[in-house]
Amino acid sequence: MATLSVWRFKDPEAADRSERRLIDFSKKELITVLDAATVSWPPDAKKPRTRQLANLTGAGVSWGALWGLLFGILFFMPLIGAAAGAVFGGVAGHFAHVGIEADFIERVGKEVAPGTSALFLLSENEVGDRLKDAFADGELVSASLSPDQEAKLRQAFAE
């Protein structure tokens, strides 16, 4: 079963630093990383910088479309204004169909703000206990996916 985890940090560079810890956990086979991405939002920036961590996953399915759509909803649609509301509702409904609820998206969108950063992780196993100590400077927000929801997510974002 896949887990989508979001680790929010109160420092705009902390998510990038957490990548080293995630690589270590992956090499030790304590976690199976399907894909990961970081968001770094300096306090004075209008929008965050996003980066997919392709070096963690090696060969396999790229989830770039998932990150692009999710980050678009979270960080860039609100900049568009009121017209984005209808689009957000439709896309949030699509994410809910695969197990990522609108309240999860809304919470992450509020918590990852200027002056913060976040690590977005799609893994094959639960990460709470395994990464809690390693990411003690972060706050965990996660949404687990059933095997059926994972299959729908893979189908929706297949290249």
Image (cartoon, rainbow, N blue to C red):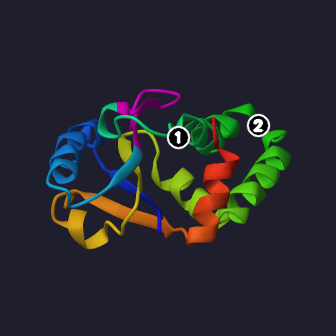
* Residue located beneath label 2 in the image: 81
Decide if residue 117 is in sight here: yes
Callout 2, which amino acid? Gly
Highlighted magenta segment, given as a residue range? 36-54
Q: Nearer the viewer, residue 131 or 48?
A: 131
Q: Residues under labels 2 and 1: Cα distance?
A: 27 Å
In this image, 127 relative to 90: left or right? left
In this image, 93 relative to 25: left or right? right
Residue in the picture at 54% in, 40% down: 67
Residue in the picture at 57% in, 40% down: 71
The reply to whether discs 2 and 1 touch (Cβ–Cβ < 8 Å) is no
Per the image, is 9 magenta? no
Callout 1, which amino acid? Trp
Residue in the picture at 80% in, 54% down: 89
In this image, 15 relative to 107: left or right? left
Q: Quadrant of residue 146?
A: bottom right
Q: Nearer the viewer, residue 109 or 66?
A: 66
Of the two numbered discs 2 and 1 in the rendering, the one whose residue sits closer to the viewer: 1
Q: Nearer the viewer, residue 103 or 2?
A: 2
Q: Picture coordinates of residue 21 (x, y %)?
A: 17, 47
In this image, 116 relative to 99: left or right? left
N-terminal label among 2 and 1: 1
